Image (spheres, rainbow, N blue to C red):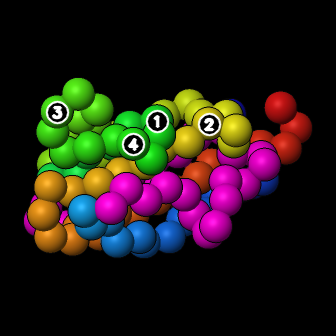
């Protein structure tokens, strides 16, 4: 694991609102990404799920990520995480870590 950060450690802030948005640094996942960490910096609860059909309630309700809460996934670059709020906008910090040698 010592070389993990040497190869890939990128981050960005992204606003999440009432339309599902992919939680990724930039426009697409880095091909060397192995881990995604998502931190909810805003006041609104964010609901996260694997597809852009994630919702804040009902059948497709995602997992809630409350203010100041974070979650990390071991996640292949071909897999996605989307976020949505029930109302308002919340900012998340997204970090991608990886290693091209794996």
The relative height of residue 31 versus residue 87 in the rendered view (above or below) is above
Q: Of helix, strand and loop, which one carries label 2? A: loop
Crowding at dot 1, Cα within 10 Å, few <14 / some 14-19 / many 20+, comes out as few
Crowding at dot 3, Cα within 10 Å, few <14 / some 14-19 / many 20+, comes out as few
**Disc 3 from disc 1: Cα separation:** 15 Å
Quarter placement of the N terminus: top right
| Snapshot quadrant of residue 88 | bottom left
Which label belongs to residue 58?
3
**Disc 3 from disc 4: Cα separation:** 11 Å
Residue at left 23%, top 35%? Answer: 61
Q: Of helix, strand and loop, which one carries label 1? A: loop
Is residue 34 part of the magenta span, yes or no? yes
Residue 82 x/y as whole percent = 43, 48
Q: Earlier in the sequence, mark 2 or mark 3?
A: 3
| Residue position marked by numbered label 4 in the rendering | 53
**Disc 1 from disc 4: Cα separation:** 8 Å
Q: Are marks 3 and 1 in contact (CB under 8 Å)?
A: no
Crowding at dot 2, Cα within 10 Å, few <14 / some 14-19 / many 20+, comes out as few
Which label belongs to residue 91?
none
| Residue position marked by numbered label 1 in the rendering | 50
Q: Are marks 2 and 1 in contact (CB under 8 Å)?
A: yes
| Snapshot quadrant of residue 39 | bottom left
Which label belongs to residue 79?
2
**Disc 4 from disc 2: Cα separation:** 14 Å
Residue at left 15%, top 39%? Answer: 57
Tell me the magenta residue range. Answer: 19-44
**Disc 2 from disc 1: Cα separation:** 8 Å
């Amino acid at each position: 694991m010592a070389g993990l950060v040497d190869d890939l450690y990128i981050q960005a802030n992204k606003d999440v609102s009432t339309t599902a948005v992919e939680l990724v640094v930039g426009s697409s996942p880095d091909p060397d990404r192995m881990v995604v960490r998502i931190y909810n910096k805003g006041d609104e609860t964010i609901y996260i799920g694997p597809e852009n059909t994630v919702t804040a309630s009902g059948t497709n309700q995602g997992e809630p990520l409350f203010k100041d809460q974070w979650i990390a996934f071991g996640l292949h670059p071909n897999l996605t995480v989307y976020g949505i709020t029930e109302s308002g906008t919340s900012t998340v910090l997204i970090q991608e870590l990886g290693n091209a040698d794996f």
